Amino acid sequence: MNAPPADESGSLTLMLGQWRDGNADAFERIVHALHGEFQRMAGARLRGWGDASLSRGDLVNEALMRLLRHPAGWENRAHFFATVSLTMRSVLREHARARLADKRHGGERLSLTLAAGELGQESMAADLLTLDALLTQFDALDPRASQVLQLTYFTGLGREDIAEVMALSLRTVDRELRFARAWMQAQLGRGLEA
């Protein structure tokens, strides 16, 4: 994703401030202006999810409803997009937990297969919860590297955009991302610790 022109970014900052100050029209303008970006972010979050009961639109709508109930004082465009991404993560985590609870309590039966490329929905929900737990652990370990990782994979910001919004050099962004990937790979390779 390319950074928007300065006037567009400034306009977003202005609209976010207006929304925080109680202007409901500002929220509508934000949603209208960023609808495509929200859909793309939801697609990135849902990639590999394999659960037809939750669409990109469902994920965007639920995340926006949560944000509408609790508008925050976003520091900048990146902070706003990171908040949207984390809210989508929260929606997916709750959806996964509900699916697993439904399965345990005799609700709709979820398919489970042993084919490597076709994991059942229960397995996908468990994988999402594992990923969420790992991201939470990593955020406690190294918040800056965690933010770089999440901005890279869940908002789609490019290296240059991440460097700009986090006030880091490209070298630092690359180093943090290498560390984050190595840490995640190590954790996924040996399982989740309690």
Image (tube, helix red, strand yellow):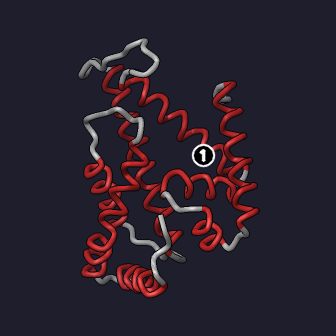
Instruction: Name the residue furthest top.
Output: 114
Q: Position of residue 161 (x, y in %)?
A: 57, 69
- The x, y position of residue 75, in whole percent, is 54, 77
Considering only vertical position in the picture, is 86 above or below 102? Answer: below
Q: Residue at x 35, y 60 (%)?
A: 38
**Label 1 packing within 10 angstroms: few (<14), some (14-19), many (20+):** few
Q: Going 72% across and 55% down the picture, which residue do you hit? A: 176
In the picture shown, does residue 158 fall above or below 139? Answer: below
Residue 99 in the figure: left or right of residue 7: left
How far from the left and from the top, in percent, is residue 93? 43, 41
Residue with the mark numbered 1: 136
Decide: is 69 above or below 95. Answer: below
From the viewer's side, name the closer residue of 42 and 26.
42
Residue 73, image x and y in percent?
48, 76
Q: Residue at x 32, y 50 (%)?
A: 59
SS type, badge 1: helix
Using the image, determine if residue 191 lies above or below residue 150.
Answer: above
Q: How many circles with numbers are drawn on the protein? A: 1
Residue 150 appears left or right of 171? left
